[in-house]
Image: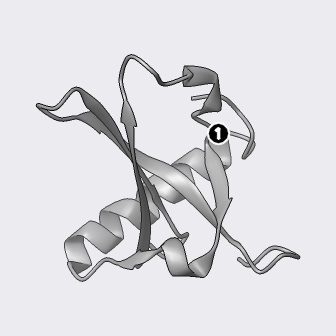
Amino acid sequence: MATETGDIRVWLVERGYNNRDLIILKYATPDGKRLYRRELAAQAVDMDSVTAAKDVPPADLEAVDDSSLQNRYEAEVERMADKHDPSDTI
């Protein structure tokens, strides 16, 4: 779904941490075929800025080539959209 500004709405589908003390947030399009990824320093992140959905420019999205991952992301987007408003803090 494109917004008035041409951005695409993506929904939080995964949150993780890596060995460099970064929080990795993954947001996917409703069809699960495109992904927006953010890496944030764990000590610097404002958890109030982690929302159920974000509107991002299409150029910031990457393709999800794995069909099982696409299906998982699609199901998680549906679950998130059913339970949360886009601006809900997660």
Which image quadrant is residue 87 in?
top right
Q: Amino acid at mark 1?
A: Lys
Residue 51 position in % (x across, y down): 62, 38
Question: Dot 1 corresponds to which residue?
Answer: 83
Q: Is residue 63 left or right of residue 5?
A: left
Q: Residue at x 24, y 80 (%)?
A: 67
Locate the C terminus by quadrant: top right
Q: Outermost residue, left direction?
A: 19
Q: Nearer the viewer, residue 59 or 51?
A: 59
Q: Nearer the viewer, residue 41 or 69?
A: 41
Determine whether the residue tagged by mark 1 lies in a helix, strand or loop: helix
Which image quadrant is residue 10 in?
bottom right
Q: Residue at x 35, y 23 (%)?
A: 42
Q: Is residue 60 left or right of residue 35?
A: right
Which image quadrant is residue 47 in?
top right
Q: Residue at x 65, y 54 (%)?
A: 54
Residue 6 position in % (x across, y down): 77, 81
- When the figure is inspected, residue 42 is found, relative to residue 81, above or below; the finding is above
Q: How is the image coloured?
A: one colour
Residue 33 position in % (x across, y down): 40, 79
Q: Mark 1 Cα within 10 Å, few/some/many (few <14, many 20+)?
A: few
Q: Nearer the viewer, residue 67 or 6?
A: 6
- When the figure is inspected, residue 6 is found, relative to residue 38, above or below; the finding is below
Query: How many tags in the picture?
Result: 1
Q: Nearer the viewer, residue 88 or 7?
A: 7
Q: Residue at x 38, y 16 (%)?
A: 43
Q: Outermost residue, top direction?
A: 43
- When the figure is inspected, residue 47 is found, relative to residue 5, above or below; the finding is above
Locate the N terminus by quadrant: bottom right
Q: Is residue 33 left or right of residue 29?
A: left
